[in-house]
Amino acid sequence: MTVYLSHGLESGPGALKIQALKGVAEALDDCEPVVMDYRGLNEPQQRLHHLLTTIAERNDTLANCVLAGSSLGGWLSAAVSAQQPVLGCFLLAPALGLPDYPQTSLTLQAKHTHIIHGWQDTVVPPSPVIEHAQQQRLSLRMLDDDHRLHSSLDTILVDFERFLRQCGSSTHVH
């Protein structure tokens, strides 16, 4: 199972959350984290193309991939799953429902989805994200935190490990 980790707009591959998520994925058997680097690609569509190209170059089957991302990285993960079914989407403060983003009401085609969002998020308001989760009946955890979700890192990592185990157990059919 390949886990693609996508950082946010002004962040990078070395960001706290991305590195912490990578650590969780590395600790599990059958999990290979791929940390994306979108620095220098400022347009959401450029980043989406880069992610899709990387998946294709690695010959990964999206049905066996987990896409995890924060903010714009969350939007990218959702955008890929809107095009083709994926195994999992783990979205942190995903940039859904923002007026300046293309396709903000994406229909996720993921076998497993979990969204974590902060009540105090002023970058991506909670309402459209809650609405989105409600429409698709997606797993959503709201936390008393801001857009960066740094105060909630422990909770995020526990959720991520549980999420990856869930995704992993659905791929092993004996």
Image (tube, rainbow, N blue to C red):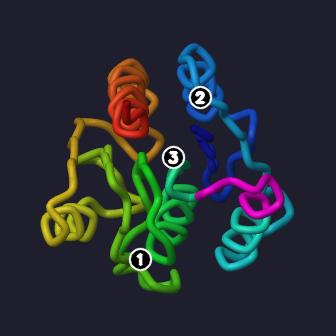
Of the image marks 3 and 1, the number of the one nearer the N terminus: 3
In what element is the residue under mark 2? loop
In the rendered image, the quadrant that contains the C terminus is top left
Give the CA distance from mark 3 to mark 2.
Answer: 10 Å
Q: How many marks?
A: 3
Residue 109 image point, x, y percent: 37, 67
**Of all residues shown, which one is farthest toward the top?**
27
| Residue under numbered circle 3 | 66
Residue 103 image point, x, y percent: 46, 85
Residue 107 image point, x, y percent: 33, 76
Q: Quadrant of residue 13?
A: top right
Amino acid tagged 2: Cys
| Residue under numbered circle 1 | 98
Structural crowding at the residue carrying mark 1, measured as other residues with C-alpha within 10 Å and reported as few (<14), some (14–19) or many (≥20): some
Of the image marks 1 and 2, the number of the one nearer the N terminus: 2
Q: Nearer the viewer, mark 1 or mark 2?
A: 2
Q: Residue at x 46, y 65 (%)?
A: 78
In what element is the residue under mark 1? loop
Structural crowding at the residue carrying mark 3, measured as other residues with C-alpha within 10 Å and reported as few (<14), some (14–19) or many (≥20): many
Relative placement, left or right, of 161 versus 116 is right
Q: Which mark is residue 31?
A: 2
> Relative to residue 52, is residue 106 depicted above or below?
below
Residues rendered magenta in the picture: 54-61
